[in-house]
Amino acid sequence: MDRRSVLRAACTWAAAAGIGALAVTSALAEDTVKIGVVSHKTGPLAGGEAVTHTPNIEMWVKQVNDRGGLKVDGGQKKIELIDYDDKTNPAEHIKAVQRLATQDKVDFMLSPYGTGFNVAAAPIYAKYGYPLIAVSAITDKIPELASRFPNMFFTLGSTTGFVEGARDTLVGLRDAGVIGNRIAMVNVADAFGIELADVARPMLTEAGFEIVYDKSYPLGTPDLSPIIKGAKAAEPDAFVAWSYPPDTFGLTEQAIIEDLDVNAYYTAVATAFPAFSAKFGSKIEGNLGAGGVNPDTPAMQAYREEHKAVTGKEPDYWASATYYASLQILEQAIEGVGTLDRQAVIDYIKTHTFDTVIGPVSFDENNNSERYWSVGQWRDGVFRAVADTGMGDSVKPVAKDGWN
Amino acid sequence: MSRGEAIGLMLAIIVVAVAAVLPLILDGYWLSVALTAMMYVALATSWTLFSGPTRYLSLATGAFFGIGGYLVGLGMSDYGLSFWLMAAIAPVVATALALLIGLATLRLSGVYFVIFTLGLAEMIRNLVSWIQNNFLGSRGLYVLTDFTDADIYWMLLAVSVAIFALGWWINRSRLGFALRIIGSDEEVAKHVGIDTAWSKVVLFMVTGFFAALIGALVAPRYSYIEPNVVFSPELSFIVVVMALLGGIHRLWGPLVGVIPFTLIWEGITISFPNYTTLFLGFSFLLIVYFLPHGVVGLMQSLVRRVGR
């Protein structure tokens, strides 16, 4: 080996070591409450995270710090936020949560985006005694998860609850004479899409509906026109899609092109996003979808205005408000306890009712909040809840009248 | 046993012993880094078993790894089967699949194989989703066990030891000799009467078996399996980069590559979260240009130089 190749190799390693050295970061500030979050800044779930979680965290931290900080230990402490990217990769996520717990020694952690990530992170939150107020986690395993992880709380409902909401909406429309019995149902062939379709199939049949078209498509299918054409050919009265964000947009675009003539049109995830309404404008008037809020309460109105003012973005009409509510719950529990004792905060969350943007929230014996909106409908640019569990403030759904 | 081999064996025992006590010393975060490193040691070494001697660049790791995790999730969640049963079934399924893929593609020359394996993870993800969607149904794939990080780490350590033992044995066998000839010149290998296609297929099945086994053992760590997450093409590339960094001409080469890479990767992830892909490509270039034989190759030529 000659001198030059040794030199080259040395350069390579020096470069690598230099990059490694830069990695050593230290942020030690006294008298702050350290709050950690692991988010998906890149990867498949980055889009959803950027709409539903990140702006809320930014706004909440600013609000708390602007009023002087959290009231703990007889004084006030500002929040110091520590934020890592996991590239939407569960292994990276787990490592980053471990890092927050044992290296940064954060006082509290916020919940991640996505059912899988909440469940993957739950054992670590449990091990180090952090409360985990899960929002973007919809599952039918709530009792089992809560008994395994007594520090884990659920706020956005169960899979069955969601399908029940859709069923009740369709039954309501049928009773009102808007639609008949014929339903075209499609789903994305991926975890949550399969799960929803699996729950919906027997439930809709039991409610007296006839599923005249039942089709799935792989995640990431670029051309969804065969799906909509097939559904149209089956001459349904209602169209239901258990869809993910990209296909919620794709299916709706095709439905407009094909002029899918149904009086009830439902798409799942992302129907509640501001981008959905921004893209299709008045064409989606009367569209049904997962989520919905009651936009008329003063708390919700104030929240939406403030969100826009602080972050420059509109919140979505579903989990945004619930995620903000989860931050309010954490804030109220910490101040209620008055210290940074995490076990005391967990006990406080279990036993108290919290005043939040989505109304009062409390948790049952399964750490579950049985108050959530499940179906929304676009009306004049606002996605209003038309079905809920425990909320009781939904409006009646109306017929979808064409794609104009 | 020669003196060199005896020293090698002693060293190996010491390394394994040190690795085995790590979970007792390390705390949560460093243990999870060690677990990740151990996973990559196992994956990169089993990758090297096939790609080292044959020089067929396989990007199929993500596909087999995904099969392991996915089957464990499916069996435990939807059918109430035990983790151990599924962890035993998954590698067998992956081996059978590797046989089919190997028979279909390894008769062709290198580049077709690389391109095929690149798309394999995506193809299998769609295939299993399609089967699950149309025939099985699902209520979400949960892998809820009582394993701690330390348990998973020890299981992976055991698998790594098994891979090393097998690799050592293959290197000394007729099969290993045949593979080295294939790697040097496949035409020559054919002319001296080696059944080149079959030798390659057998080794490809071995790497498929281990990648799926590792995927199955790691699944409890994720707790919830999503097909688009376990079938990750990035994993295939990281394994290749790590193995190349260490050097693929020695069985223990990847081991030398994985540990520094894991630590640097960790540093990058923390400090420059938005540039990880750039870094991956950059390290690919650096390794290929400056360390074509990996760290091990560099060490060997240094040793030779000093010896002269």
Image (tube, coloured by chain):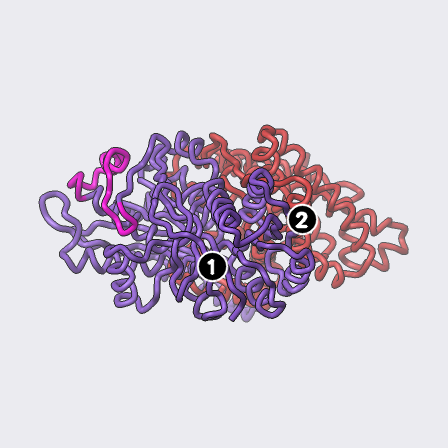
Chain colours: A purple, B red
In the image, what residue type sits under mark 1?
A: Thr
Residue A63 image-quadrant placement: bottom left
Asked whether A350 falls inside the magenta stretch, the response is: yes
Residue under label 2: B130
The quadrant of the image that shows the N terminus of chain A is: bottom right
List x then y, in percent, for residue B211: 63, 44
What is the x, y in percent for residue B194?
Answer: 86, 50
Residue B267 picture quarter: bottom left
- Rounded to the nearest angstrom, the CA distance separating label 1 from label 2 is 25 Å
Instruction: Find out whether the residues at labels 1 and 2 contact each other: C-beta distance under 8 Å.
Output: no
Residue A82 placed where, x, y %? 30, 54
Q: Residue at x 63, y 29 (%)?
A: B85
**Amino acid type assigned to the residue bearing label 2 in the image:** Trp
Looking at the picture, tell me which residue is in the foreground, A82 or B279.
Answer: A82
Query: Mark 1 highlights which residue?
Result: A271
Q: In front here: B55 or A29?
A: A29
Task: Determine if marks 1 and 2 fall on one subunit.
Answer: no
Q: Is B108 positioned to the left or the right of A270 in the image?
A: right
Q: Is residue B203 left or right of residue A70?
A: right
Question: Can the viewer see residue B160 in this picture?
Answer: no
Q: Which residues are magenta?
A: A335-359
Q: Is residue B125 left or right of residue B29?
A: right
Viewer-nearest of labels 1 and 2?
1
The picture places residue A369, in percent across and down from the top left corner, at 34, 39
Q: Chain of mark 2?
A: B
Element class at badge 2: helix
Single out the residue that lies furthest toward the left. Answer: A74
Q: Which of the two residues, B261 or B150, is positioned nearer the viewer here?
A: B150
Of B108 and A49, the residue lying toward us = A49
Q: Quadrant of residue B156?
A: top right
Chain of the residue under label 1: A
Residue B97 falls within the magenta-colored stretch: no
